[in-house]
Image: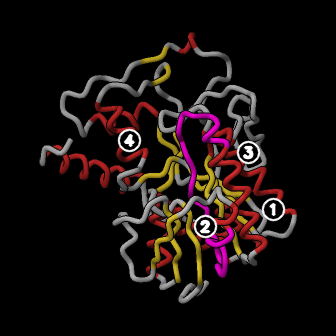
Amino acid sequence: MNLQGVPVLVTGASGFVGSRIAAWLAAQRADVRALVRKIAAHPGLDSPHITQVQGDFTDPLTARYACGGRELVFHAAATIGKDFSEALHVNVTGTAVLSGAARTTGCQRFIHLSTLSVYDFSSGWEEFTENAPLRLLGKTYAHSPAASPHYGTTKAEAERALQVEMSHGLPATILRLGAVLGLHPTSSWAVKVPAKVRAGKVPVLGDGSDIMPWTHVDNVTHAIGLALDRSESIGRAYNVVDGEVAWRDFIEDMRSWFPGCPPAPVIPVETMKPGDRFIGPCPSERLRQELGYAPVRTYFDGMAEAGAWWHKQMASGKV
């Protein structure tokens, strides 16, 4: 899709994934409106093709203004906070408000950035394809070290809210992301989780053989481009997963950046409830078969970026 001059909106533009989407769009000379909580020198938003707009997308008037005149809307904003009411308001109500505004202002494509955490990994499914059951409000689930207990559930509810607008004609595509590798000050898997690993606060379950499906942020923008190029992606959800790494190996890769780092604590398997896991295999065959997707960056690329950043920060005494 030729994006030159196309008016677009990106929510969550000061965050990791949102800023990379905005920068990717700007590199193709799209007219990017970046919705942020506060206008500032946010990383990745320095292009002349990006205009920052301050506002709260959960507010109907703000959402309608932000979507006005935008052909494409990319919804990357979300909260992983521990407050349940805030998670409901931002992730669920906010998605309902924004997608409703996008539909009524004539948005031609709506790309919703979701997460594999929407799946009910306690449901007994062996593989979590896009048709697997999603989490439900009122039920307790295990959650990853990068998110709160409410993130996956409220993101699942956000998808249900979006489906309502899709049933009324909003042309939307849902991308469910694995653990997103790549650098940004707000990155969970490159900055926040390694800081916890360095402090010995990220455990492994039993022998640590649980898997973590991952992607790279540059692969996310690549998947978005393919979705925009193919109208058959409208109304579809896709797992964006480039591979799997054993949880113990992921932790050990991060521990290697920190000399003298304490070992990861071990949670005995017998203390866990049956089916109590935060992740499972999430194949991406639909994305590959329907959109011709193939990753452009590797696990080793992402980990090398993060490791180099940590080494630089430690050498300079910043962390």
For the residue marked with disc 4, what is the amino acid? Lys
Q: Residue at x 72, y 59 (%)?
A: 97
Residue matched to label 3 = 157
For the residue marked with disc 3, what is the amino acid? Glu
Q: Residue at x 45, y 82 (%)?
A: 49
Query: Considering only vertical position in the picture, is 105 above or below 172?
Result: below
For the residue marked with disc 1, what is the amino acid? Glu
- Residue farthest to the left? 316
Q: Residue at x 79, y 69 (%)?
A: 170
What SS does tag 4 mark? helix
Residue matched to label 2 = 74
Instruction: Kindly check if marks 3 and 1 are in contact, taking CB atoms under 8 A apart as contact.
Output: no
In x, y percent, where is residue 174?
69, 59
| Region rendered in magenta | 64-88
Q: Quadrant of the N terminus?
A: bottom right
Q: Residue at x 73, y 45 (%)?
A: 157
What is the spatial separation of the Cα atoms under label 3 and label 1, in whole angstroms? Answer: 13 Å
Instruction: Kindly check if marks 3 and 2 are in contact, taking CB atoms under 8 A apart as contact.
Output: no
Q: How many neighbours does mark 2 have within 10 angstroms: few (below 14), some (14-19), or many (20 or more)?
A: many
- Residue farthest to the right? 168
What SS does tag 2 mark? strand
What is the spatial separation of the Cα atoms under label 3 and label 4, in whole angstroms? Answer: 25 Å
